[in-house]
Image (tube, rainbow, N blue to C red):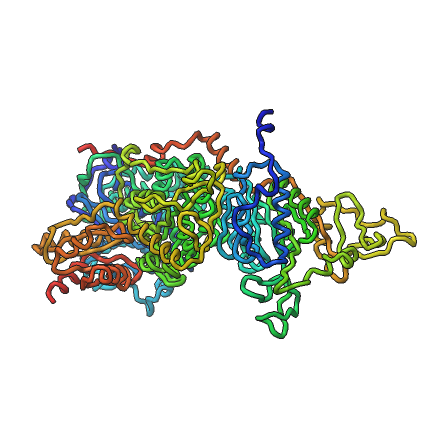
Amino acid sequence: MSTDTQATSRHVPTQQRPSVVIRFCGDSGDGMQLTGGQFTNTSALFGNDVATFPDFPAEIRAPRGTTFGVSGFQLQFASTEIFTPGDSVHALVAMNPAGLKTNIADVEPGGIVIVNEDEFDKVNLKKCGYTDGYNPLDDDEFNRRYRLYRVPMSRLTRESLASTGIGVKDVDRCRNMYALGLVYWLFERPLDATVNYLTDYFTKEKGKPEIADLNVRALRAGFNFGETAEICTETYQVAPAKLRKGRYRRISGNEATALGLVVAAKKAGKRLIYSGYPITPASELLHHLSRLKQYGVRTFQAEDEIAAICAAIGASFAGDLSVTGTSGPGMALKSEAMNLAVMLELPLVIVDVQRAGPSTGMPTKTEQADLLHAVLGRPSESSVIVLAAQSPADCFDTVIEACRLAVRCMCPVIFLSDGYIANGAEPWSVPGLDSIAPIPVQHMTENNNPVEGGPVLPYKRDPATLARPWIIPGTPGLEHRVGGIEKQDVTGNISYDPDNHDHMTRTRWLKVQKAADAIPPLKVRGPESGDVLLLGWGGTYGAITTAGDELRKAGHSVATAHLRHLCPFPKNLGEVLHNYRSVIIPEINLGQLRLLIRAQFLIDAIGINQVSGRMFRVEDLVKKTLEIMKQ
Amino acid sequence: MSAVTSLPTYAPKDFASDQEVRWCPGCGDYAILKAVQKALSGLRTKKEDYVFVSGIGCAARFPYYMNTYGLHSIHGRAPAFATGIKLANPSLDVWLVSGDGDLLSIGGNHTMHLFRRNVDINVILLNNRIYGLTKGQYSPTSEFGKKTKSTPIGSLDYPINPLMLALGCGCTFVARTIDIDLKHQEQMMLRAATHRGTTLTEVYQDCNIFNHQSWFYASQKDSRPDNTVMLEHGKPLIFGKAGDKGIRLNGTHLEVVALGNGVKPDDLLIHDETNLAIAFALAQMNHPEFPEALGVLYCDPSKRPYDELVKEQIDQAIAKRGEGDLVALLNEGDTWTVDN
C-alpha cells in the first residue's frame, strides 16, 4: 500500500520486535498530540494493535520551555494483542530539555532517546532547572545509559524548507513533522497516511495548501535524514498483529461514548439530547455530538452543570433519550437533580469522565475515585444504576448498555469513564448495526386505570421490572403531574403517609436491584478457581488483564475479572469471589470497590491502590500481587 | 379548515386538577390560579399540549392544581427543566410558575439565561417579597431594611427589580399585573400566551401570612389609582382617582405632572411597548415617588425563539447533508480490514 518508504534501500540492519513503546514530548504548543496521533494511526493502519496515552497539562500554553508546560503522547504498538500503552518507554522523542527532564525516568535502560539538540541551549536548560552549565546530553553517565541521538531538528527543518520561501514562524511549526518523519524511518513505517492527513487537514479544512506542502516536506525531510545520515545503527520492525477478522478504526473513549449514544438513540427509536457544560475531560462529548445534527442529535451547552442535568431531565420528561456529561466537580453539582430524577423515575444517563480530584484537582490526569459518589453519594436513600467502561472502545458498548438500562428501569444510570480511557485510543472492530439489539421503548397512550373514567396512574408499575410507565406530554387524556415530593405509589399523588414512604423507598431500591435480571454474569479470565482473583473495574482493565496474563505465564494461579456493572453487581459475583483464596482489588483510589465488596460479601479483599493521576504500570501490579501472595 | 373546527373549547374548570388546593386561605395565589385557568380556556391549545413547570416554594405548587402535564422540580432550576422540555418538543406550550425567591435568588442564574436565550416559555413570577414556605425570611425583592425572622433588625440587601433584570437580559416580553385584578391578569396571560419567545409576567401577590399588605398601596380600591398607572400601547400615561395626573418625559427623565394648567394628554408620554429605553424607564418607576406601571412594558416579537432556531439548525443540517447515515458514521475516518 505504501510507496513512500519502499522507494529507498536500507543501509542498516533491521531488528524485529514484538512491541514498542514510544513517547513524544515537548512544549504544549509543539504539536505532540498530533504527532503521536499520527504515529498511532499509521501503526493501526499498518495492522499493529495499538494503545495510546495522551498526557498533557491543563494549561493551554504554559511558558515555553518550562517543565509544567510539557505535553506528552505515549503509545504502544505491537504484533500481539495488547491492553495498555506500556510501562517502560523504548523510544523517547524529546523536543526540548524540559520534555527530556520530565520523561527520561520512564525510559528503559538502553532505550532510544532522540532529542532536538538545537533546543538544548543555556537558556532552555536553565529554564527547566539544569543549572551551572550542565547539559544531560554531554553527561557520560547519560550516554552510557541510553542510546542518544542528537539531531539538530530546528536547523535541519529550516534548511530543508528554506527553498519554499515561507516565513520562519510557519517553518518552525513543522519541527514535529520532521521528528515524526525520522521516527517513521526508524520503525519502518509508511508515510502515506500522514501525508493524506496533512493534505486533507490543511488544504480542505484550513484552506492553506502551502502549509500542507510545508508539513509534508518536513515529514519527508525527517525520513530522508534517517535514511542518509546513518546516525542510527539499526531500524526496528513490528509485524502486524493477528486481530480478529473485521473492519477496524482507531477510536478514543470519548469518541466511542459519543457514537454509542447516537446508536443507542437510534436503537431506541428516540431522539438524542445531550446537555452539558464545558469541563475537562468531558467537553469532547459535547464537541463530537454537536457536529451530528443531521442525525437529529440535539446538544445544549447549558449555563452551568446544574442546568445541564435539569434540561436533560426536562427533555426526558418530554420523551427524548436524555444524557448529561461531566467530570467530578460537575457530579457534585448535579447531585440534587439526580435525586429528583430518582423520584421522578425517568430515564437519564449521566456520563462521568472521572479525573483526579477532589475539587479542581488535576483536570487532565486520571483517577477512578468517583465510584462511591456514584453509588452512594447523594443525600437520603437514592438508588441509581452504575456502570463503568473498561477501555476506549468499550465505552461504545457500555454507554449503549447504560441507555438500555435507563429506559428499561425508568431510572438514572451513571456511566463512569475516566481521563485515561476517554483520551486514550485503541483499534476498534466496527460493529454491524444489526449486531446491536434494539432498545424497546413504550410510551403509554391509553389510560391505565382499571376503573372506568378514573385518573391516569403514572406510578402503576410493571411487576417484572418495577418500572413506571413513560408517559409523555402531548398524549391526550393522560395529563398528570410529577415532582420531587414523595408520592403515593400507583397514583403519583403527593403523600406524607409513613408506610407509603417506607414502601416507596424500598421500591426505588428494589427496582435498581432488579436491573441485575438483565445483566450478564461476570466472566473470569484464567482459572475458574485458584489462589488469587484480581478484581477490577473501569480503566484499569488493560493493566490488570496484562498483569494477570503475565502472572499465569510465570506459573501462578491467578485469574482476573473486570466489573462493568457496579450497581447492581452481576448476580454471580459472590459465587466468583468465593472461588479464590484471595481477592485482590487494584484501584486508582484508596479502596472504593474494595469497601463495597467487603460490605456486601464479607470478603477480606486486599487492595492495591495508587492515586498519582496515572494508570498502574503492569510491572508494579505484578510485583505487588506477588508480594501479597507471599504473605 | 377542519383542523380549526376540531380544536377543543374549554371551560376554566377543565383546567382544575382533582387535587385539593393547599395554599393558606386568603393567599393571592388562588386568584392567580383562577386567572390562568380562565385565560387558558380562552385559548385553543389542546389541554394535553400544556406543561406547567415550577421550582420550589408556595407558588411552585401551582402545577399540581392544573389539570395539564406538570413538573414540580427543584429549587431555582425550573427554567432549565422548562428549556429541556421545549428542546425535546417545541410544540408543547410550556408555562413556568414560581416565586421571587425561587426565580430571582437560588435560580437567578437560570432565569437570566432563560431570558437571554428567548426560549418560547411563559414565566409567571408570583412576587410576594417574602419566603413563605420556609416561614417568613426576607426575599431578594424585599425592601431594604425589611424586618423578618432572619433579619430581626432589618435586612441590608437592596432589592432586585425583576422587570429590569428581564429587560437587561434581553427578555422579549415583559409585563406586570396584580393578584386582585382578575381581568387584567387574564389579559396579560393572553398576551403572554400569544407571544413567541420568553415572556415574563410579574404578579404582585399578597402573602397574607408573612407579608400581608405589602402591595396594599397598589392593590386597594382607594390607594391603587394614585399609586399605579395602567399601560396601553399608543395611549398617554394617565393615572389618579380623577384621571388628572400623568407621566411626562422631561429630557431623559420621567416626571409626574398634573393635567390642566396647560398640560394636555398629548404632552404626556405615549406608551410604546416596542421601545426598550422607555420600558427601562417605566420599570424604574417605584412607589412612592412614582405610580408603578401595570401592563405590557415591552414586547419585541422580532427576535426568534431559541427552540425554533435549534430545530431549524437540525433541519438545515439534514437538508444540506442528508439524513445521517449511521453506518457511515461508525466507519468514519481511516479504517482497515483484517481478513484472517
Residue A225 visible? The answer is: no
Residue A628, given in percent of the width and then of the height, sits at 14, 64
Locate residue A580 relative to residue A282 in the image: left or right.
Answer: left
**Above or below, comparing residue A69 to residue A166 in the picture:** below
Left or right of A548? Residue A218 is right
Does residue A433 appear to the left or right of B147 in the view shown? left
| Identity of the residue drawn at 51% across and 37% down | B311
Left or right of A606 in this view: A321? right
Outermost residue toward the bottom in this view: B153
Residue B160 location (% of width, % of height): 63, 60
Q: Among all residues in the image, which is located at the extreme front?
A: A451
Q: Quadrant of residue A505?
A: bottom left
**Residue A3, percent across and down?**
26, 33
Residue drawn at the location 75% of the way across and 55% of the way down: B228
Foreground of the two, B250 or A146: B250
Screen quadrant of the N terminus of chain B: top right
Q: Quadrant of the C terminus of chain B?
A: top left
Q: Residue furthest left?
A: A555
